[in-house]
Image (tube, rainbow, N blue to C red):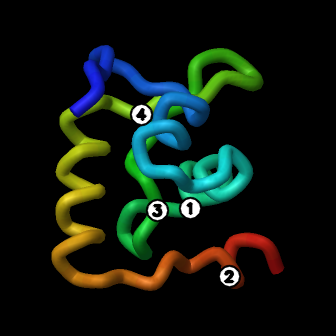
Amino acid sequence: MMHLPPHLTAKQISEFTSLSKRKVYVLMSISPEVGGIPSFKVGPKSILADRDEFLDWWEKTKREGRTFPLEEATS
């Protein structure tokens, strides 16, 4: 497993998951209550995810076979 820093960018999550960076940004913009990646904004443009929260989300997503709610976020 690759080394992950304490706070992850969309690029780092994309490299870890093999999801496109665009999909990661969409998932980071969706509320975690409906399946999005738990994340937080830093300044007006930067968005980060806490490593441990992301890994919990990733394991839960793999375990549940969750379908990403991309259609809802882009409409």
Q: Find the residue positioned furthest to the front.
A: 1
Which residue is the site of mark 3? 36
Q: Is 2 rendered above or below residue 75?
A: above
**Picture disc at residue 30:** 1
* Comes first in the chain, label 1 or label 3: 1
Q: Secondary structure at mark 3?
A: loop
Q: Is 75 rendered above or below residue 62?
A: below
Q: Residues within 10 Å of mark 3 (few under 14, many from 20)?
A: many
Decide if residue 47 is on the left or right side of residue 2.
right
Disc 1 to disc 4, C-alpha distance: 13 Å
Q: Kindly identify the amino acid type of the residue bearing the numbered disc 2.
A: Glu
Which residue is painted at 53% across and 27% down in the image? Answer: 9
Q: Quadrant of residue 61?
A: bottom left
Disc 2 to disc 4, C-alpha distance: 21 Å
Which residue is the site of mark 2? 72
Q: Is 50 rendered above or below residue 67?
A: above
Confirm or deny contact between disc 1 and disc 3 (CB under 8 A).
yes
Q: Kindly identify the amino acid type of the residue bearing the numbered disc 1.
A: Ile
Which residue is painted at 29% across and 26% down in the image? Answer: 2
